[in-house]
Image (tube, rainbow, N blue to C red):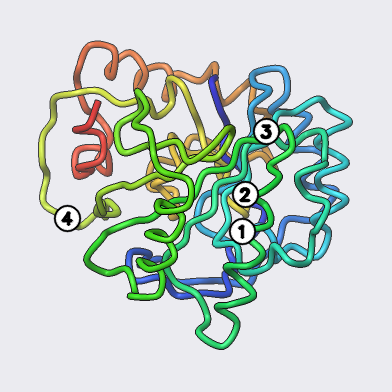
Amino acid sequence: MKRVYLEITDACNLSCPFCTYEKGNAFMSLEEIDRFTDEIRPFCSYLYLHILGEPLMHPDFEQILDLLDQKKFRLQLVTNGMLLYRYPGLLDHPCLRKLSVSIHSCDENTEKDYFNTIGSLIEDPKDSIIELRFYDEDSLSKNVKDYRDSLIRRYGINETAKQGSFQLKENVYLYHQELFEWPKIDDPVISSEGTCHGGIDQIAINHNGDVTLCCLDPHACNLLGNLKKDSLADILSSEKYNNIISSFRNRKIVCDLCSRCSYRLRF
């Protein structure tokens, strides 16, 4: 696996228009995170704290970082950034490889402090990579656009090999991505042919322990197993999992949700 997505919570403090998931209030316990990451580590060292919840809301977030560092994980943290002020030493943590901040929706009452916090991270990114994500140009607020434009004026931008990615300065990138549709099981079928990185390069583990093919399946339509009762080794050696992967490699789509997913058409 190139990466594993782990949703330590399904709670979120914002309601971004591109996210249609109904927010919850569930948090993985430290004991569960310890056990789940023991299952993950033999297969992958790159862990993404991201599916839909806001990871910085987890009350044990600092202990989670220490736990991941003990297990030698390389962490990518995906956050809306509203709670970054709580963790001023985040970039100094040895397990943090990349910080991705989705700058899309923010509380107008705290907007100035929000941008100041991000600005201080940009000034000194330490050894981490910082990626500022701006989704869906048409739905960005004027203040967010103004902030983005001020960064470009200050630092300039250089296009990178990654589509939509521009370097502002060393270790700091600005990323534009077109809005995508979250696949739904009742959507029309798009195609039964094609492939995806889901399952082959990555898997996702939802807040309740459900293991799925990718981070676009928060309701576990493509349920492979559950880490509360199944080992990850057993899940990845199961007939169901291997049939799906074999089909992807032969450009056949056998999962109902995947046949309705437009994101995989990018591959």
Q: Residues within 10 Å of mark 3 (few under 14, many from 20)?
A: some
In front: mark 2 or mark 4? 2
Q: Residues within 10 Å of mark 4 (few under 14, many from 20)?
A: few
Which residue is labeled 1 in the image?
119
> In the drawing, what numbered circle is on residue 97?
3
Work out whether 96 lies above or below 119.
above
Tally of numbered tags:
4
Q: Secondary structure at mark 1?
A: helix
Which residue is labeled 2 in the image?
122
Q: CA distance from mark 2 to mark 4?
A: 40 Å
Q: From the viewer's side, name the closer residue of 14 and 44.
A: 14
Q: CA distance from mark 4 to mark 1?
A: 40 Å
Side of 246 where 40 appears, left or right? right
Residue found at x 13% / y 25%: 193
Of pointers 4 and 1, the one earlier in the residue sequence:
1
Q: CA distance from mark 3 to mark 4?
A: 36 Å
In front: mark 4 or mark 1? 1
Q: CA distance from mark 2 to mark 3?
A: 15 Å
Q: CA distance from mark 3 to mark 1?
A: 19 Å
Q: Are marks 1 and 2 in contact (CB under 8 Å)?
A: yes
Residue found at x 41% / y 69%: 144
Work out whether 76 lies above or below 241.
below
